[in-house]
Image (tube, helix red, strand yellow):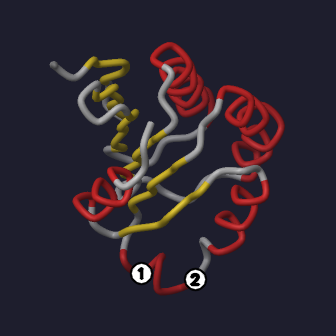
Amino acid sequence: MSDIIIIDNEYISMSYLPDKKFVYHTTYKPVSGQILRDALLAGLETLQKYGAHKWLSDERKNGPMTREDQEWGRVNLNPRAVEIGWKYWALVVPEQLIAAGSMAPAIEEYYELGMRMMVFSDVKEAIQWLDRFED
């Protein structure tokens, strides 16, 4: 079955992969504010529409998330994500970000919400991790 394109613009592309049963998005340059928020909400709607529970984010070309977007996510996105059953998140970031250990608080925060999040520097490894879980 063909991938279903959800968003495709200069900042971000997002698809639903029916064969893998996950949402997959890639950022092409730093994105924040309403463009980011609209994309994340579209991803949640896609998870809900297809009854999926997995998401792959390739954020290697994105910049740091603003405090405003972080807070918006905590208040508006995270509760809804848990409600619709998002369970597994593979996040691909630059290698130096993993080495710095700066993702540990986010991983713990999502774990407390009932979501398993793993950080990778390679998309193939992220896909292999997601494939381990039944949807």
**Amino acid found under the numbered disc labelled 1:** Gln
Observer-nearest residue: 16 or 64? 16
Quadrant for the N terminus in the image: top left
Residue 79 location in percent, x, y?
79, 35
Q: Which mark is residue 119?
A: none
Is 102 located above or below residue 44 in the figure?
below
Residue 97 location in percent, x, y?
48, 76
Considering the numbered disc 2 on the image, is that residue within a helix, a strand or a loop? loop
Q: Residue at the far left: name it.
A: 1
Residue 8 location in percent, x, y?
30, 23
Q: Residue at x 60, y 37 (%)?
A: 86
Give the labeled residue for mark 1: 96
Give the labeled residue for mark 2: 101
Q: Earlier in the sequence, mark 2 or mark 1?
A: 1
Q: Residues within 10 Å of mark 2 (few under 14, many from 20)?
A: few
Q: Residue at x 28, y 19 (%)?
A: 5
Q: Residue at x 36, y 47 (%)?
A: 29
Is 60 located above or below residue 40 in the figure?
below
Q: Residue at the far bottom: name it.
A: 99
Q: Nearer the viewer, mark 2 or mark 1?
A: 2
Observer-nearest residue: 111 or 96? 111
Left or right of 83? Residue 4 is: left
| Distance from Cα at disc 2 to Cα at disc 1 | 9 Å
**Amino acid found under the numbered disc labelled 2:** Gly
